[in-house]
Image (cartoon, grey):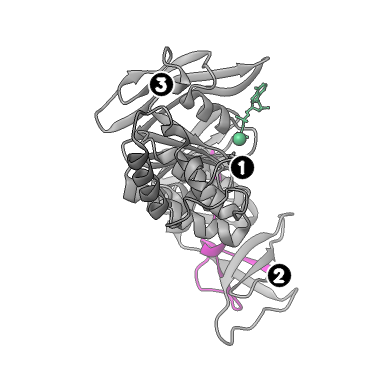
Amino acid sequence: MNSDNNIISINGISKHFDGVKAVDNVNLEIQRGEFFSLLGPSGCGKTTLLRMLAGFEAPNTGEIYIDGQPMSAIPAYNRPVNMVFQNYAIFPHLDVGGNIAFGLRKSGLSKAEISAKVEEMLTLIKLPGYAERSATQLSGGERQRISLARALIKQPKVLLLDEPLGALDKKLREQMQLELRALQKSVGITFVFVTHDQEEALTMSDRIAVMSKGQVLQVESPADLYERPNSRFVAGFIGNMNFFDGRVQKIDEGTTFVDAGPLGAVEARIDNGAPAGTDVVVAIRPQKLKLHLKAPGESANTVEGRMGPAAYLGDRSHLNVLVPGREQPVAVAVQNMEGSELTASDQPVWLSFAGESVVLLRSE
Ligand SMILES: Nc1ncnc2c1ncn2[C@@H]1O[C@H](COP(=O)(O)OP(=O)(O)O)[C@@H](O)[C@H]1O
Ligand SMILES: [Mg+2]
């Protein structure tokens, strides 16, 4: 279970609060040097799981191993981890250097050694020469960099980050995402990063664990999670997805033939093991649907509809196509090219998709 490449091993961890299962039998292996994210909607148990890693909360069942050591008997202050919070507590009575050096005050290091380490951290977070600045006159981004430096200066084996960019505005958050990712790679410390923002998790992570209602539903790299979600929840949470109910007709040489009601005959280039007669959900990303103004030759993997409301977003447009027999419009995303014309509302259109673009999910 504790293979050498794993720095964290979470075995059967549960945590209840007054009958609420905040974390429900979670098993996870996190590798050394990984940027690992816990992603899920608010209330799904991300913070509780992170707090158990930190030692701020004790699990009801299970054991957490860090670097091969069981953690249940190890108090928070003796764990080889450090935590960065969304609402970074900067001490206003200390200057920037004093804030960063805070965790070293009992380390026995000399003043000169501490100053050297602080300056090293300031270079790392791209704020060289800031040591003597007042901590009260910093921007949100600077404050967050300083709390990172404060957490990293003790060289923890694992850094735990609970929505650390949540308080920043969009532009700064996107810039900090790239910086944080680069910083993690340069220091080589394992990061366990909590976010409810799927784009943030996709941008930053080596692997992502998607959580819902206290459980981990899927653990994959960003691309695999996006291309091969294994449940309707994950498929809908990571990016946009159209869902169609269907029933498997037959499977032939890696192609699953599905009758998908208003969408018609679907030939999916996958065999997920669902035998003929199984109810399934056909899932297709909006950008994997092709829009045609004339009927395409093929009949499988195509559907006729009418143009519904469209949203122009500059570089792309989000179209809605109304398909007979289906209440919810089909979402189609198109790139806006030079001279591309917007399709008039109510105009007849056809949608087609490649059999490789179809994700087949179990009906829940
Ligand atoms: N100290 C606590 N006491 C009671 N319930 C809690 C406590 N901490 C968290 N919870 C509950 O546990 C669930 C998971 O919360 P949390 O881990 O904070 O989720 P997330 O970080 O994903 O938003 C929620 O239903 C929350 O209300
Ligand atoms: Mg939280």
User: In the image shown, does 56 or 127 lie closer to the viewer?
Assistant: 127
Q: Which residue is mark 2?
A: 310
Neighbours of disc 2 within 10 Å: few (<14), some (14-19), many (20+): some
Task: Report x, y in % for residue 309.
Answer: 74, 68
User: In the image shown, does 318 or 116 lie closer to the viewer?
Assistant: 116
Three-letter residue code for mark 3: Asn
Provide the residue span drawn in magenta: 279-306
| Left or right position of 169 against 109 | right
Q: Residue at the location (56% across, 27% down)?
A: 48
Q: Which residue is mark 3?
A: 78
Is 150 included in the stretch rendered in magenta?
Answer: no
Three-letter residue code for mark 2: Ala
Q: Nearer the viewer, mark 1 or mark 3?
A: 1
Q: Which residue is mark 1?
A: 92
Image quarter (top left, top right, bottom left or bottom right) of the C terminus:
top right
Q: Are marks 1 and 3 in contact (CB under 8 Å)?
A: no
